[in-house]
Image (cartoon, grey):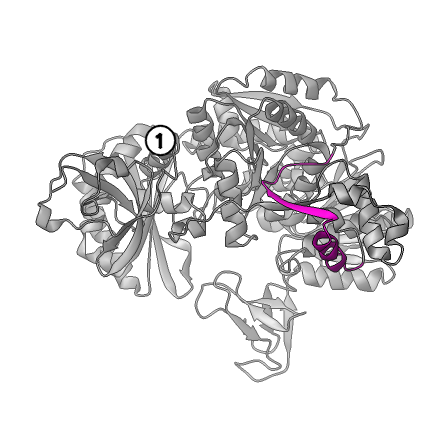
Amino acid sequence: MSDFYLNIAVDTPLHRIFDYLPIKNSARSDYQIGQRVFVSFGRLKKIGVILNISSSTELSRKQLKPISQLIDRQPLISLDDLKLYKWAANYYHHPIGEVLAQAFPKQLRAGLTPTIELTTRYALSKHGLTLDENSLKRSPRQLGLWHQLKNADAPVDRDFFSTLDWNWRSPLKSMIEKGWVTASQEHNTATHSPTTPLFDPNSAQQTAIDSIAKALEGFQVFLLDGVTGSGKTEVYLRLIQHVISAGKQVLILLPEITLTPQLAQRFRQRLTAQMVISHSGLNDTQRAQAWLRLKEGLANILLGTRSAVFTPMRTPGLIIMDEEHDTSFKQQEGFRYSARDIAVMRARDYNIPIVLGTATPSLESLYNVQQGRFKQLVLPERTAGASHPDIRLLDCRNQTLDNHLSQSLLKAIGKTLERNEQVILFVNRRGFAPVLMCHSCGWVAQCRRCDSRLVIHKNANLLRCHHCGVEHAIPNTCPSCQQAELFPLGLGTERVEETLSSHFPDTPVSRIDRDSTRQKNAMQSVIDKVHEGGAQILVGTQMLAKGHHFPNVTLVGIVDIDAGLFSCDFRASERMAQLITQVAGRAGREEKLGRVLIQTHHPEHPLLNTLITHGYTRFAKEALDERQQAQLPPYHYQALLRVNAINEQAVLNFLNDAKELISTIQAPLIQILGPVPAPMLKRAGRFRYQLLIESAQRKPRHQFLQQLLPKLEKLKSSRKVRWSIDVDPIDLF
């Protein structure tokens, strides 16, 4: 009979850990914290992780089951990693089992034990080196491979032959069979020589590099606040080189998958390092290999999106988060964590610095600078002699517009193209038009499952809901009055693309949005086309605003800014200011002067005038003052109880029960607002309500949620709804 018990976190929405017995006749020494196990869970078989090994349990032995299988001989995660995951579960009030599941790639969540793949490398054998050209004349392809391998400084992998436009595999196989070439299996390591930078850092860049380099032996948070085009990436590169030269690893987090190939290419050119990549566009094997390589110390750099923040580091040296302000760093479903906050805590646990880079710092980060928690490093000027773009408002009131494009904007586009330069038009809505309306009876195409209108996608001949994804063919006649008088209302990227093609038929027009870049490498092919030069027009959504460097773009037009100027969300002005600044930053990034034209029907709007006259820094200062007066984040702390169900009354019943529970909890420092319907009441067929919890201090909010959530789980009415708690919500939608 065993004298110990296994405390196991199971991937389940329940806020608790579970006690299990060890496998019969196994020893205590077989088990360690951080190992994965298979366990029986009701009628299911689930993956669990050992959190503790204890000598007692509150349950009787008859109530306990033995684990089904011990998956790992050694712990998959360290105690330091487990400390972070426990902190995240505690702070976000989320089940530890689901937090651990989020931390693992899919193959590890499924109980697989993948091994690190080896790379095949090729080199001429001793016999191959003694060959001469005459002996290979009858086989020109083998001769070509022989020359390439002979000129290589070291064994090469398959990528070495990727530039050949003929089938090299068959002649290579023949050369291996003849003993002329050796093929060896080894861990992948960098073999190329790095390129040297084209210029030295300016004084601001060098100050930032020196400040961070001096702090590499301890924890500190740096806010690298650099205007667009100020060379933040160059600062990253020099710091990374410093860290990997010391034999340590770097974790780099990006907001968008589309930025990964460009940054990866630049890093590969400049750094002699083994880099792995992790994002949702890769398959399960690729993500598992990246996770394992960083964990085992076989990779120097991990370049990834939000979920990569959980990847263990064998020899941690530095964490970098680019575009730290971006809202995509906050997970909006399931485990609703902030990758920025997790990254800061991870750096603290590892006792290493973290760099948060952006041209438009979030108000939360600027508040932390005020409080002395973060150190701000400013890059005020653009590099390579580039100047700040000239930003102007175009008053569209009483103007004749062609599908929302003013004559002034069209004229400016024409002059830019005549100079063989490039143009970006920003339209913050994909599709052809957001509304299909009947001119005869006023019918509007609505989504039956959501409180939203169906968006016209003309190229696909579809009406599509951007919230639940439902699609319908575009009708020829009105479903209400049967008249053939349907017309599009509003604009989207497809409509602007069509309008521009009619005005400039001889100029290539490329569209960049989620619809046009769904296929693999679609985004990269557009970017490559832009870098080829010549007169071109790019039409796109927010995907265009993030980190792209287009040296020949000298004009940026922002078409539909008014839609974002008025919102019930208190964060809307911050996001709009960031978006305008980021989009404007695409213009004039090298020697050529850049212009930014913003179309608006509200040229007197204070947000627009503050940005244009004084820049983002002044706007952020004023916005922080407003937040403090209004007692809003980051000066106050929020949590949002979200509830949804197919039956609206079930939601209301649960919320009424929740309100009664709340009244029994003594929490004088907590303010409850609601419950109220979500701004979009019905989404994907489910009715959505929410209740906002506010406090002037973080600790009372945490203590209140600790008391409330276990009681909510026990409510009978909770069984008929889906509910979740969102700590530090960034979206009340």
Tell me if residue 219 can be seen: yes
Q: Residue at x 42, y 45 (%)?
A: 104
510 or 602: nearer the eye? 510
Q: Quadrant of the N terminus?
A: top left
Q: Residue at x 45, y 25 (%)?
A: 350
Res 321 quadrant in image:
top right
Q: Where is residue 653 shown, x and y percent of the image?
A: 23, 57
The residue beneath circle 1 is 79
Mark 1 falls on what kind of element? helix
Q: Where is residue 456 shown, x and y percent of the image?
A: 61, 68
Q: Is residue 657 above or below residue 667?
A: below
Q: Is residue 167 magenta?
A: yes
Q: Residue at x 34, y 47 (%)?
A: 71
Q: Is residue 287 magenta?
A: no
263 on left or right of 702: right
Q: Label 1 crowding class (10 Å Cα cut-off): few <14, some 14-19, many 20+? A: few
305 on left or right of 668: right
Q: Amino acid at mark 1?
A: Leu
Q: Which residues are magenta?
A: 166-192
Tell me if residue 396 can be seen: no
Q: Where is residue 186 shown, x and y percent of the image?
A: 59, 41
213 or 41: nearer the eye? 41
